[in-house]
Image (tube, rainbow, N blue to C red):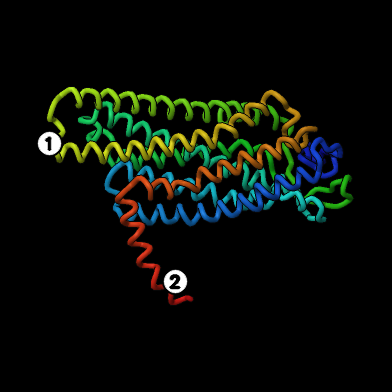
């Protein structure tokens, strides 16, 4: 690594690592296919889908806590997908073959990697909050309406967005971007400069935000879903043991079915979230054990290939919510069909 006159360390300088662990054709194929092809296509579709989600929920009216929370979740997913599009481009391996005046990975880290991680963690906590709210509505239904109000949902979701801004503070504090003379390339490049204590600060941040927070989120979601499933099964057995209850009270039966559909929808969202995010968390855990996987390390190419898959799964997680809502929510489907009927004549006019 090079050091500037101010004592700052040049991060990820081009030309430092010449050994290639992975065959370059294989390496380029996976990065281009996962980031540029699949990542961009799925991401763009996901952006459109989340915009439709926000429009749909606003049309429904943000009158209850679950609608407010799902709108916040769509906003977070939308932010993550928009940033991911830039991250996909900067991870294109062919950029390193062009004589650029900047280091793509440094820009990706500061402007895309950590901001995208911020939105992923926001989505995780919002999903956990929504699951907890449904868990309480199943376990103690008579008290939930008075506790989980629209005002509480707005306050909690805004707090999640604001508090998790601390996630991007360490990288913005220890790393700055500037034009520096790089001897390996024999030219001045726009690259990242790290402080002498960068590793210590980022290590503490890593333990809290990349290990403790994601696994806490997974644990909270799993526990809430287990409580929901067990409680629903217990109540179903109790109802079947009491003859004629469902038949005498049709209105109560319909309310239970509506609640059940909402619970199933949120459980599905939670399962997809965990399935798509665990690989990335596992990769971050491996990074804490094998330091050679970090930026500039001897095994960073392997990390990049794995990251291309984990980022793709994160993109899928942020993009499929509109399909789940459309399939499982009658109210969402009605408003979506109304929106389609509104735009159909306009699309025909354009043709």
Q: Residue 40 in the image: x percent, y percent? A: 60, 53
Q: Which residue is mark 2?
A: 347
Query: In this rendering, is residue 244 above or below 76?
Result: above
Query: In this rendering, is residue 171 above or below 235?
Result: below
Residue 24 visible to the viewer? yes
Residue 126 visible to the viewer? no
Q: How busy is the neighbourhood of tag 2: few (under 14 within 10 Å), some, or many (20 plus)?
A: few
Residue 179 located left or right of residue 307 = right
Q: Residue at x 63, y 30 (%)?
A: 284
Which quarter of the picture shows residue 13? top right
Query: In this rendering, is residue 166 above or below 183?
Result: above
Q: How busy is the neighbourhood of tag 1: few (under 14 within 10 Å), some, or many (20 plus)?
A: few
Q: Which residue is mark 1?
A: 249
Of circles 2 and 1, which is in front? 1
Secondary structure of the residue carrying numbered label 2: helix
Q: Residue 253 in the image: x percent, y percent? A: 19, 37
């Amino acid at each position: 690594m090079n050091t500037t006159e101010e004592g700052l360390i040049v991060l990820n300088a081009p030309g430092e690592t010449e050994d290639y662990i992975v065959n370059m054709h294989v390496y380029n194929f996976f990065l281009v296919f996962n980031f540029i092809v699949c990542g961009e296509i799925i991401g763009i579709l996901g952006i459109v889908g989340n915009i439709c989600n926000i429009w749909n929920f606003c049309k429904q009216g943000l009158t209850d806590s679950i609608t407010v929370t799902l709108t916040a979740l769509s906003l977070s997913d939308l932010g993550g997908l928009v940033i991911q599009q830039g991250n996909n481009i900067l991870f294109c391996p062919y950029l390193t073959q062009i004589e650029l005046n900047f280091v793509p990975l440094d820009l990706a880290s500061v402007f895309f990697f950590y901001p995208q991680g911020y939105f992923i963690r926001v989505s995780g906590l919002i999903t956990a909050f929504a699951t907890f709210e449904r868990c309480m509505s199943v376990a103690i239904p008579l008290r939930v309406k008075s506790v989980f109000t629209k005002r509480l949902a707005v306050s909690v979701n805004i707090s999640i967005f604001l508090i998790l801004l601390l996630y991007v503070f360490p990288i913005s504090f220890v790393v700055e971007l500037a034009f520096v003379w790089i001897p390996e390339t024999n030219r001045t490049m726009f690259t990242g400069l790290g402080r002498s204590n960068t590793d210590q600060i980022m290590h503490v941040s890593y333990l809290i935000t990349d290990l403790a927070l994601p696994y806490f989120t997974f644990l909270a979601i799993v526990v809430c879903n287990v409580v929901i499933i067990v409680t629903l099964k217990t109540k179903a057995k109790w109802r079947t043991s009491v003859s004629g209850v469902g038949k005498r009270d049709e209105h109560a039966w319909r309310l239970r079915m509506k609640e059940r559909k909402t619970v199933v929808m949120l459980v599905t969202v939670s399962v997809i979230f965990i399935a798509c995010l665990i690989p990335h968390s596992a990769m971050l855990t491996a990074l804490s054990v094998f330091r050679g996987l970090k930026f500039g390390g001897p095994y960073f190419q392997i990390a990049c290939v794995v990251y291309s898959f984990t980022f793709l799964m994160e993109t899928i997680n942020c993009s499929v919510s509109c399909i789940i809502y459309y399939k499982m929510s009658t109210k969402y489907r009605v408003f979506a069909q109304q929106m389609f009927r509104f735009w159909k004549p306009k699309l025909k006019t354009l043709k």
